[in-house]
Image (cartoon, helix red, strand yellow):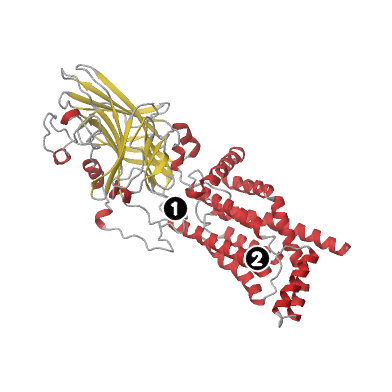
């Protein structure tokens, strides 16, 4: 029974660490240990400045409305520079760069599309000299919007030339927002005025599309917003349901909640999400960051996901604007979020938006853990010390459960010499050996697997915390003390992993030695083998494990002394 207990514990421990290591590989874009990385062809991974144009030109408007029967814009003609019937002459195309205190955005005057967003507060972890790009030309990744006319009528869309009306390009000191306004020439008597409002300190950009009807007839336009991106994602592969960092589109409605839609499902037309609703949003998610089109009004909308080019996809929403009489105008307002997955700030922007921070199958445990960690940070103002405080609280919560396990281990260690003597004496009589062993356990009131259950209960909590630390952009680039300048990456000098390894060996020494010599050796070798993985884990996770080990050693040592003292008195 004692051997079975150790076998169970080591099996669970080994499997958990292997899954965490595989998840870390996939999170950092490396191939899974259990599946080869998908091959990426040159055609499917566009790069360079030309991609900004390809994202703008190739992205198609949404399919015809189920109720309005609208026709799509002739993309080929618009992209090639040919004059679309009813359109104004072409104007010189520009790339307008706007800078606020938190981002640098590039707007293409062809369609008024946002084709590049650089986050000034976040550096690339592989190239610290560069800032993070969310809307990234390397992935033909852009945010587009436009109008769709009824009965085949062409209206200004995301391929139509627009001219800037405002001149400001940098958020001035004391200014609350930077505003960019663009206008298209009339197309079939309809002019589109597009206004971006970039707030100070924020990533939710106000987007207003105004339809100005200069014709003498009533029009019934629809407004669309969409995100366009190629299908290239970091190598990832699930193994027995292990969660991964998702990259790709996601939809949300109050009815169906959060729905991830992988690019491959768009390819084979097997997507599952609400096609119509009076609420919801659409997004493209990646590790730590996301973009999302938001509209919190209770108004009807259609959702769509489609392939619009070679390895290029569009996801978005379509809204009915109603009638716009001749000589009148009507505006439609939405928000475009492009920034970090800061859970508390996302909650305030739109219902369910915080779900773009993907914890996978451990969400039910991870969300309350993050809430507690976030609260501790509000008190301590340091994510490293907040992790330490979280461990202390978790150890307090599991104190009596751990105490039961440690008492069982301590009793096992106390009777171990007696077990060893009995095994040696009855080594040629295995059946009698088992009977004698069970008798000793009954006499000493020892449960040989008493230490298993408490540890197994805590493993899901550890895995959930792993994903909290790995998924939380709040911890990205967060320092702790001294040499630990980023808790989301490995310790650069491996100090924490070394201390963690030493603490694990000390904990092993406190545990009862297995009677079997081979198992006794494995008991020392296994912690060393698995400690190697921690040399490449995020420093925040190693800090958690090290703190947990130190507190466990203190509790186990105290219980061992209590039992030894009781034995001496007896």
Q: Secondary structure at mark 1?
A: loop
In the image shown, does 91 or 252 lie closer to the viewer?
252
Instruction: In the rendered view, tell whether residue 96 sits above or below residue 472.
Output: above
Q: Quadrant of residue 402?
A: bottom right
Q: Is residue 525 left or right of residue 170?
A: right
Graded by Cα atoms within 10 Å as few (under 14), some (14 to 19) or many (20 or more), the crowding at tag 1 reads: many
Graded by Cα atoms within 10 Å as few (under 14), some (14 to 19) or many (20 or more), the crowding at tag 2 reads: some
Q: Give how far across and how far down residue 534 sits, in percent.
A: 54, 60
Instruction: In the rendered view, tell whether residue 220 sits above or below residue 546.
Output: above
Number of marks in the rendered image:
2
Q: Give how far across and how far down residue 474 sits, in percent.
A: 50, 43
The numbered mark at residue 244 is: 1
The numbered mark at residue 5 is: 2
Marks 2 and 1, the one that precedes in the sequence: 2
In the image shown, does 504 or 455 lie closer to the viewer?
455
Rounded to the nearest angstrom, the CA distance separating label 2 from label 1 is 31 Å
Q: Is residue 376 visible?
A: yes
Instruction: In the rendered view, tell whether residue 483 sits above or below residue 102.
Output: below
Q: Is residue 278 left or right of residue 559?
A: left
Q: Is residue 94 left or right of residue 488?
A: left
Residue drawn at the location 78% of the way across and 62% of the way down: 445
Mark 2 vs mark 1, foreground winner is: 2
Residue drawn at the location 81% of the way across and 58% of the way down: 562
Q: Is residue 153 left or right of residue 21?
A: left
Q: Looking at this view, name the residue that lies furthest to the bottom.
A: 428
Q: Is residue 483 visible?
A: no
Q: Secondary structure at mark 2?
A: helix
């Amino acid at each position: 029974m004692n051997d079975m207990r150790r076998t169970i514990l080591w099996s669970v421990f080994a499997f958990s660490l292997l899954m965490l290591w595989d998840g870390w590989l996939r999170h950092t874009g490396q191939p899974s240990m259990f599946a080869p990385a998908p091959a990426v062809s040159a055609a499917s991974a566009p790069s360079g400045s030309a991609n900004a144009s390809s994202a703008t030109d190739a992205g198609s408007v949404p399919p015809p409305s189920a109720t309005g029967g609208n026709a799509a814009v002739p993309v080929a003609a618009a992209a090639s520079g040919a004059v679309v019937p009813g359109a104004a002459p072409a104007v010189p195309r520009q790339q307008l760069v706007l800078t606020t205190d938190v981002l640098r955005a590039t707007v293409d005057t062809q369609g008024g599309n946002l084709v590049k967003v650089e986050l000034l507060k976040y550096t690339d972890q592989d190239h610290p000299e560069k800032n993070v790009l969310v809307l990234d030309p390397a992935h033909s990744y852009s945010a587009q919007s436009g109008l769709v006319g009824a009965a085949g009528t062409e209206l200004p869309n995301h391929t139509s030339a627009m001219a800037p009306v405002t001149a400001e390009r940098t958020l001035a000191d004391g200014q609350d927002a930077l505003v960019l306004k663009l206008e298209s020439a009339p197309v079939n008597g309809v002019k589109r005025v597009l206004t971006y409002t970039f707030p100070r300190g924020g990533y939710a950009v106000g987007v207003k599309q105004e339809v100005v009807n200069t014709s003498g007839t009533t029009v019934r336009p629809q407004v669309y917003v969409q995100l366009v991106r190629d299908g290239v994602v970091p190598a990832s592969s699930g193994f027995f349901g292990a969660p991964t960092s998702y990259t790709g589109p996601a939809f949300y409605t109050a009815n169906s909640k959060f729905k991830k839609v992988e690019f491959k499902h768009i390819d084979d037309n097997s997507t599952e999400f609400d096609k119509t609703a009076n609420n919801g949003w659409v997004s493209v998610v990646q590790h730590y960051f996301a973009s999302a089109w938001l509209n919190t009004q209770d108004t009807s909308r259609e959702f769509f996901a489609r392939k619009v080019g070679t390895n290029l996809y569009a996801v978005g929403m379509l809204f009915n604007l109603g009638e716009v009489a001749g000589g009148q105008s009507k505006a439609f307002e939405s928000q475009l979020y492009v920034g970090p997955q800061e859970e508390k700030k996302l909650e305030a922007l739109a219902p369910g938006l915080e779900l773009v921070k993907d914890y996978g199958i451990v969400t039910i445990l991870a969300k309350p853990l993050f809430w507690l960690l976030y609260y501790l940070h509000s008190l301590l103002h340091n994510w490293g010390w907040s992790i330490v405080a979280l461990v202390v609280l978790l150890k307090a919560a599991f104190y009596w459960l751990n105490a039961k396990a440690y008492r069982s281990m301590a009793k096992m260690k106390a009777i171990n010499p007696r077990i060893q003597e009995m095994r040696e004496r009855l080594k040629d009589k295995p059946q009698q050996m088992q009977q004698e062993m069970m008798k000793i356990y009954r006499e000493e009131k020892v449960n040989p697997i008493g230490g298993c259950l408490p540890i197994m209960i805590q493993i899901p909590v550890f895995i959930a915390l792993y994903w909290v630390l790995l998924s939380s952009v709040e911890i990205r680039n967060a320092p702790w003390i001294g040499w630990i300048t980023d808790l989301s990456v490995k310790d650069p000098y491996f100090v924490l992993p070394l201390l963690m390894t030493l603490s694990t060996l000390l904990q092993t020494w406190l545990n009862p030695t297995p009677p079997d010599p081979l198992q006794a050796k494995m008991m020392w070798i296994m912690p060393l083998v698995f400690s190697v993985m921690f040399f490449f884990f995020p420093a925040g996770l190693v800090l958690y494990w090290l703190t947990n080990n130190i507190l466990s050693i203190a509790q186990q040592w105290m219980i061992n002394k209590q039992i030894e003292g009781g034995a001496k008195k007896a």
